[in-house]
């Protein structure tokens, strides 16, 4: 145990003694007792068995391996006594059938291959290096090094007079979503794109490589989707049921050039003899030679064949374990994580799937002991997240009416049990709930310390502040729930051991037990948090959202708009936006106080339910049915993924995209529109408060 924790342990309150926000004093004690039992139920040994079983074979979306994981998860949930459901979608998803790369006429060996001590890698050594939704074709040209392939890297190349058109671009992974790298390469006329993992980012510059250490070896490959957008690209905005109309390939947001991921061993072959222009500052990576931009004289040829002509559509399966709510069956709490992977996927995302299974186990066992959820609980696993959030998106489009009306929370599990450190994020309205729940769960390395105390300690949070949490921009299955529908979202995970097996064949059970979670105690701990999150949300008298924290979190986001306005010598008026955010915060403060005093006594019959009906509308009001001007599917006006990065979050995207587009008139309209929507959200909070005190 780390000595620095002892002081914290003395100071921490006994676990489980916290207030249960949103619970009447009459219902809190029974709920607390049920939660205390339930958190003892996630079981490291059972988690280990599930992890072993699910990571035993490859389970890329659209392959028979995914039917196997579907059947495994459904069988587990049935054995727990849960009702189950499988939803099938027919998704346009061609798979590469042949991938070849030549350097100066010599073929590269693209396989990752077996490593000593890793049985999984020996079994699946021939796995193709796929970038999901890359184009097909046979292209050849001089090699040009484009650094990370960011928008600004191409600006730099332009300023150097380096032409990418007609060339084979080589980009390194990192600093942006790979779909953006593909989009930019194609936009600048590259005939093919090779993306490699530089040793500086997750290879030998970081530490010993697998199998000696956890970092990426020379042949290690980061596979991944390269589509920009969410869901089946042939059915934008509606579910991919069999027989629905499809848009033509030319209109889909997918690359049309071949895009292939390679290891840094092969990247060295491509880059070592490139000459031409010297590299700009910061472009040198970790390979043992001086990098050059080119183009040439090294030439590359890239050939990708797919099954587009023979089998362009694949069946995808989302799975659900369902517990129908006893009092409010139309109010739905969803926990989900993706079940597909690029390889064995022990970390990404068998671990998240195991967390969901263990939480379902705990809830099911607690129900056998007499606990009853008042709201409906869904324990979901999604297919084809890796190809572009596809399974979750199709489901959300399929069930949008039901979710829009009754979705009270979505919890995402993508990556779990990766180490002792805790992290979380999501909508500011649920951050308080996540903090509360982590106060009730012990940390596995220091059982007298709550997860919350460990979290504070590990992130060195000053007294009086809370641990920072991530914003829901892009990159996982919460997008359909949060960014598309405005359902409050929270996610969390354990990690901190580092490594270079992301999207590789080496994301194996062997790697996981050696470097991340040998005893599966972190997997179990993450599932304990999931268990309490589900149970707390299921039975709260008043839904435990915090719109005071939501407003407080929004407050500092107005100043950057003013700053951009000044920098452009525009005169954007933001006073109404600032005032409407302050009004939401004030309404939240007043609501929280009223809620706590009403629940401390005996609320009038039906008052809490009427308040909840209003509360469900608050974040829906911060979405806009027609979406962002640039991306209509993204309806949340609070957070979106940055269009030029894919991973990072853009706050107030409607306003900030107008600013980026250099359009002050549009920016002003967007500011006024968002201020109006904050006003609507505030009206729902006030209506909820009125409902609580109404006799
Ligand atoms: Zn994942």
Image (cartoon, helix red, strand yellow):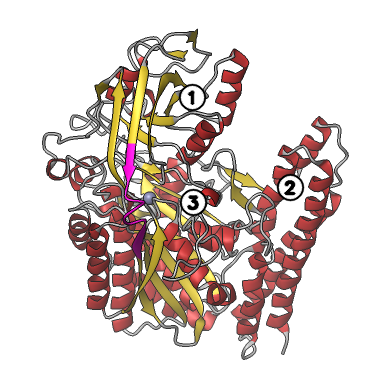
Label whose residue precedes the other's in the sequence (3 or 1): 1
Work out how far the residue at label 2 is from the one at label 1, CA to CA, in angstroms.
Answer: 37 Å
Query: Which residue does the image show at 44% across and 16% down from the upper left?
Result: 284
Name above or below for residue 120 compared with residue 101: below
User: Which x, y percent locates residue 131?
Assistant: 37, 41
User: Which x, y percent locates residue 244?
Assistant: 48, 69
Q: Which residues are magenta?
A: 304-316
**Tag 1: Cα neighbours inside 10 Å, few (<14), some, or many (≥20)?**
some
Question: Which label was assigned to residue 249?
Answer: 3
Query: Which residue does the image show at 36% across and 29% down from the upper left?
Result: 197
Label whose residue precedes the other's in the sequence (3 or 2): 3
Name above or below for residue 252 compared with residue 115: below
Which element is circle 2 on?
helix
Query: Which residue does the image show at 32% across and 60% down from the upper left?
Result: 353
Work out how far the residue at label 3 is from the one at label 2, CA to CA, in angstroms.
Answer: 31 Å
Label whose residue precedes the other's in the sequence (2 or 1): 1
Which residue does the numbered mark 1 point to in the structure image?
166
Which residue does the numbered mark 2 point to in the structure image?
655
* Quadrant in the rendering for residue 618: bottom right
């Amino acid at each position: 145990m780390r000595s620095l924790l002892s002081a914290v342990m003395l100071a921490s309150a006994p676990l489980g003694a916290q207030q249960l926000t949103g619970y009447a004093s009459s219902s809190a004690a029974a709920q607390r007792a049920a939660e205390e039992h339930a958190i003892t139920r996630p079981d490291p040994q059972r988690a280990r068995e599930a992890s072993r079983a699910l990571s035993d074979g490859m389970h890329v979306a659209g392959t028979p391996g995914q039917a196997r994981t579907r059947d495994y998860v459904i069988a587990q949930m049935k054995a727990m006594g849960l009702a189950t459901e499988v939803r099938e979608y027919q998704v346009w998803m061609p798979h590469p059938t042949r991938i070849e790369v030549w350097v100066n006429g010599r073929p590269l060996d693209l396989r990752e291959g077996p490593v000593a001590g890793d049985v999984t890698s020996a079994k699946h050594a021939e796995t193709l290096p796929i970038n999901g939704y890359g184009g097909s074709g046979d292209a050849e040209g001089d090699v040009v090094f484009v650094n990370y392939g960011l928008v600004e890297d191409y600006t730099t190349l332009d300023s150097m007079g380096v032409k990418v058109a007609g060339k084979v671009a080589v980009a390194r992974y990192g600093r942006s979503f790979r779909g953006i790298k593909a989009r930019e390469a194609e936009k600048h006329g590259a005939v093919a794109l090779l993306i490699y993992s530089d040793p500086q980012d997750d290879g030998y510059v970081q530490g010993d490589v697998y199998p000696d250490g956890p970092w990426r070896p020379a042949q290690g490959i980061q596979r991944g989707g390269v589509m920009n957008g969410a869901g089946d690209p042939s059915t934008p905005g509606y579910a991919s049921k069999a027989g629905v109309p499809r848009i033509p390939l030319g209109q889909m947001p997918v690359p049309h050039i071949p895009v292939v991921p390679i290891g840094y061993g092969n990247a060295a072959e491509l880059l070592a003899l490139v000459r031409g222009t010297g590299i700009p500052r910061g472009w040198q990576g970790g390979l043992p030679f001086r990098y050059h931009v080119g183009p040439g004289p090294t030439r590359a040829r890239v050939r990708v064949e797919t099954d587009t002509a023979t089998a362009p559509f694949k069946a995808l399966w989302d799975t659900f374990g369902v517990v129908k709510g006893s009092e409010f069956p139309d109010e739905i709490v969803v926990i989900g994580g993706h079940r597909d992977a690029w390889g064995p996927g022990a970390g990404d995302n068998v671990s998240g799937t195991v967390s969901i299974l263990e939480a379902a186990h705990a809830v099911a066992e607690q129900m056998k002991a007499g606990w009853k959820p008042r709201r409906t609980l869904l324990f979901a696993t999604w297919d084809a997240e890796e190809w572009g959030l596809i399974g979750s998106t199709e489901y959300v489009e399929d069930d949008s009416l039901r979710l829009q009306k009754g979705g009270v929370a979505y919890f995402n599990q993508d990556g779990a049990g990766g180490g002792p450190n805790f992290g979380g994020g999501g909508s500011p309205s649920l951050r308080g709930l996540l903090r509360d729940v982590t106060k009730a769960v012990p940390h596995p390395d220091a059982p007298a310390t709550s997860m919350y105390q460990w979290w504070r300690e590990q992130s060195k949070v000053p007294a009086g502040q809370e641990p920072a949490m991530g914003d829901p921009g892009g990159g996982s299955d919460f997008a359909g729930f949060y960014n598309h529908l405005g359902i409050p979202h929270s996610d969390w995970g354990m990690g901190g051991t580092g490594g270079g097996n992301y999207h590789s064949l080496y994301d194996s059970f062997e790697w996981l037990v050696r470097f991340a979670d040998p005893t599966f105690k972190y997997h179990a701990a993450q599932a304990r948090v999931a268990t309490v999150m589900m149970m707390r949300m299921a039975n709260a008298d008043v839904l435990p959202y915090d719109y005071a924290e939501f407003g407080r979190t929004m407050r500092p986001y107005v100043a950057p708009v003013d700053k951009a306005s000044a920098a452009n010598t525009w005169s954007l008026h933001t006073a109404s936006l600032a005032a409407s955010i302050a009004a939401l915060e004030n309404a939240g403060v007043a609501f929280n106080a009223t809620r706590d005093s009403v629940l401390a006594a005996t609320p009038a019959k039906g008052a809490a339910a009427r308040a909840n009906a209003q509360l469900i509308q608050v974040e829906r009001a911060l979405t806009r049915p027609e979406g962002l001007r640039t991306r209509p599917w993204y309806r949340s006006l609070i957070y979106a993924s940055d269009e030029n990065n894919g991973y990072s979050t853009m706050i107030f995207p409607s306003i900030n995209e107008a600013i980026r587009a250099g359009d002050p008139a549009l920016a002003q309209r967007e500011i006024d529109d968002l201020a109006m929507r904050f006003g609507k959200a505030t009206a729902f909070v006030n209506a909820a408060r009125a409902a609580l005190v109404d006799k």
